[in-house]
Amino acid sequence: MKKPVKDMSLMQDDSDNIVMFYPHVSKLAKTSVMEVLDTRWIGQGPKVKLFENSFSKKFASNLPSIAVGSGTDALHLSYILAGLKPGDEVIAPVFTCTATNIPFLYMGIKILFADIDSNTMNIDVKHVNQLMNKNVKAIICVHYGGLPCEMDELQSIADEWGIPIIEDAAHAVGAKYKGLSVGSISDFTMFSFQAIKHITTGDGGMLVVKNKDLIDKAERIRWFGIDRKAKQAGIWENDITEIGYKYQMTDIAAAMGIASIKEFDEVSRLRKKLFKVYSDELTGYDRVKIVGNDFEDREHAAWLFTIIVDDRFRLQEKLRENKIESNQVHFRNDRYSIFNDFTSGKAFPNMDKIEDKYLVLPLHTMMNEDDVRRVCKVIKSGW
């Protein structure tokens, strides 16, 4: 991988700068947090349950949801609930945030990395099919940038082998695949509420689980292995029989999440409008390929707007010279030393092809359509 020549450290949030990301924290969210701070519950309390129920209704067809401290917590929890154990194999994308794959290192699970589809940057279904074997116990897919994966094809493979699909939907709250909300499709779906996501709780996550029989276990594992409801009711047997973690969400965070759900439709409309302006402005410009803008059977969540270009570093420098921040956000995991045991001798030709060519442009609620046109004007002036 090449390296940029110039310093690309984070830009300051000055009036003329268009930064990559900006958290969306509304007045309602701030007020809601202040109200919680005046109550008995600032840790996990009634707001967490209300947030879970509101999220389930809005995004998951009323499937049960478990609120946790981060998206990574939710992923680890899903891997435990899926019954994965040391020595098992899983298929996971080579291109994703490391949060998708690091929990497997905690668990002693072997990762079979799958290449990307170079048109979508999602997992390559053909490679998944090639990797399948009797030791694979789950398929993990990531909806890159907010564009849903080929869920029908992945589900067909999973059904053939009798294993679950675990969706990393950190980018994809509000996305739909063939009319179905992401969150209502697979056995497990994780969402992230990290600082710069559509919904932010400062940091946080949600795990949607299809099998309602797993919820009590999920709630115990989220809280040290303790049956918290029984303990609070004074009927707990004072015994822990399974390893748990401190993965709970707080009412402070949940208050932000509840406010964000109330305002989600407005936020989503703006993000999708900005995404469309980018697409309209750059479609037909032959030096730019847009990732994920031309699918009619699925609805993009518009978290990232990504382009594929030659001489990506020079374009990034030119944007920077014009006070516009851009970057790659996520990277191929096979470049990280912690995954060396799973990558030696493995080939990912589709990832190789675009490794130095993809670039993420600014997209957030502090931008307007004129900001997007300004970015596109710089790009179309050449580099």
Image (spheres, grey):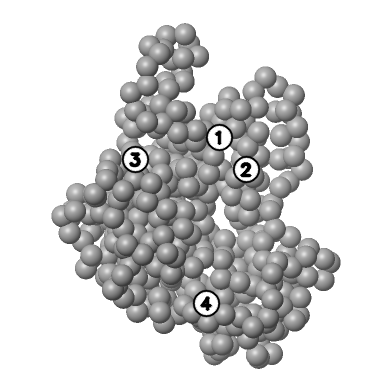
Q: Secondary structure at mark 3?
A: helix
Spot occupied by residue 361 in the image (x, y as percentages of width and height):
62, 72
Q: Are marks 1 and 2 in contact (CB under 8 Å)?
A: yes
Disc 1 target residue: 249
Is residue 85 placed above or below 314 in the rendered structure? Answer: above
Residue type, numbered disc 3: Ile
Q: 13 or 157: which is nearer to us? A: 13
Mark 3 crowd level (few <14, some 14–19, many ≥20, 10 Å Cα): some
* Amino acid, disc 4: Tyr
Asked if residue 115 is positioned above or below residue 75 in the image, the reply reads: below
Q: Earlier in the sequence, mark 1 or mark 2?
A: 2
Q: Measured from the top left, where is residue 70 in percent x and y?
A: 53, 44
Residue ID for mark 3: 80
Q: Which of the two discs, 4 and 1, labels the residue nearer the N terminus?
A: 1
Q: Amino acid at mark 1?
A: Met
Q: Earlier in the sequence, mark 1 or mark 3?
A: 3
Residue under the image location 62 percent in, 30 percent down: 251
Residue 358 image label: 4
Look at 32% across and 30% down and name the residue there.
213
Q: Nearer the viewer, residue 368 or 349?
A: 349
What's the distance in space between the residues labelled 3 and 2, CA to CA? 24 Å
Q: Quadrant of the C terminus?
A: bottom right
The residue that disc 2 covers is 201
